[in-house]
Amino acid sequence: MPFNEHPHRRLNQLTGEWVLVSPHRTKRPWQGQREEPDLAGLPAYDPDCYLCPGNARAGGAVNPDYAGTFAFNNDFAALLPDPPEGGPSTGSDLLVAEAEPGICRVVCYSPRHDLTMARLGVDRAAGVVDLWCREFADLGGRENIGYVQIFENRGTIMGCSNPHPHGQIWATRSVPMYPANEDRHQAVRLREKGSCLLCDYLALERESGERVIFENDSFVALVPFWALWPFEAMILPRDHMATILDMTPAQRRDLADAMVRLNVRYDNIFQTSFPYSMGIHQAPVDGGEYPHWHFHIHYYPPLLRSRSVRKFMVGYEMMAMPQRDLTPEAAADRIREQPEVHYLEGR
């Protein structure tokens, strides 16, 4: 059966979930909502931005005059370090709640208000990776922390309230639902097959090359076979590594290179600052043994047909199962064919 013509479903080996692929639907006309992008350039410094150097934040603290990266505790954190234990009493085994202590950090990638990962350059992106590693080591070594989630929301349609280049880190006592699910499936593969799920998967992808976008000495960027979002991508280390702390200095720089190159291609697809949610999944830090873990980075961008048409996860996707129109292979072709020079560099 040709994957590029007929509806079919694909299994996500990391989660055990299926995604419906409907390539024939890419021919249908679009008459729905259009998101108009903000094409206005941003200033290098914004006196009203709560992340720019020297500015006051919403909570009253004043940022230092930082020149590289900068991290601080979120002034409006979703988690608190010492909530009351036990959770609310419900009186029923069907109504379960428990306390979830944690720490929320904000990570500024650059003092420049107008940059994104695509335009940071490898040197400054490597500084971001180094900061992630320091934060992961610090938070992961603290008492009552079992998992450290590094992530970034980029673009207003992904809920990002500030365009200043930044991400977040939430450290929690429990292992959150999505990485916990990936943990189970990776553990099953090692137990039943004696091998790493993502090592085996990466070998298949590199052999076929069909969904590989590019690779460098240490990392591979690809569109996963089971991709859900239109231009979804993963960055995986070629060597087996459980967490980002397993990287050498050279591998950290290679990760920065891979992130910049992928983001440049993303922006070039529709010549816009490409929105996405990005997150690093890696082994828990709760003191357990995790030989099955292979860390990786997920990119979930919503744009589909143009810089003003996005994918909506509604209806069937919410009530039954995820569905996509563009095949992962076609998406990989589209990303791969983009130039590695950012479209704004020539202006």
Image (spheres, helix red, strand yellow):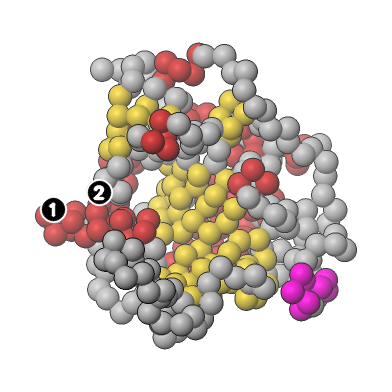
Front one among 181 and 141:
181
Asked if disc 1 and disc 2 are in contact, CB closer than 8 Å, the reply is yes
Residue 95 magenta: no
Q: Which residue is mark 1?
A: 193
316 vs 292, left or right, is right
Which residue sits furthest left? 192
The amino acid pointed to by label 2 is Asp
Residue that sits furthest to the front in the current view:
91
Dividing the picture into quadrants, the one containing residue 269 is top right
Category of crowding for the residue at label 1, using alpha-carbon neighbours closer than 10 angstroms: few (below 14), some (14–19), many (at least 20)? few
- For label 2, the residue is 200
Q: In percent of the image, x 26 and y 66: which residue is there? A: 93
Three-letter amino acid code of the residue under disc 1: Lys
- Secondary structure found at label 1: helix
Percent of width and height locating residue 321: 35, 35
Residue at 41 percent across and 56 percent down: it is 296
Q: Nearer the viewer, residue 21 or 283?
A: 21
Q: Secondary structure at mark 2?
A: helix
The residue segment tinted magenta is: 54-61
Give the percent coordinates (x, y) of residue 148: 45, 70
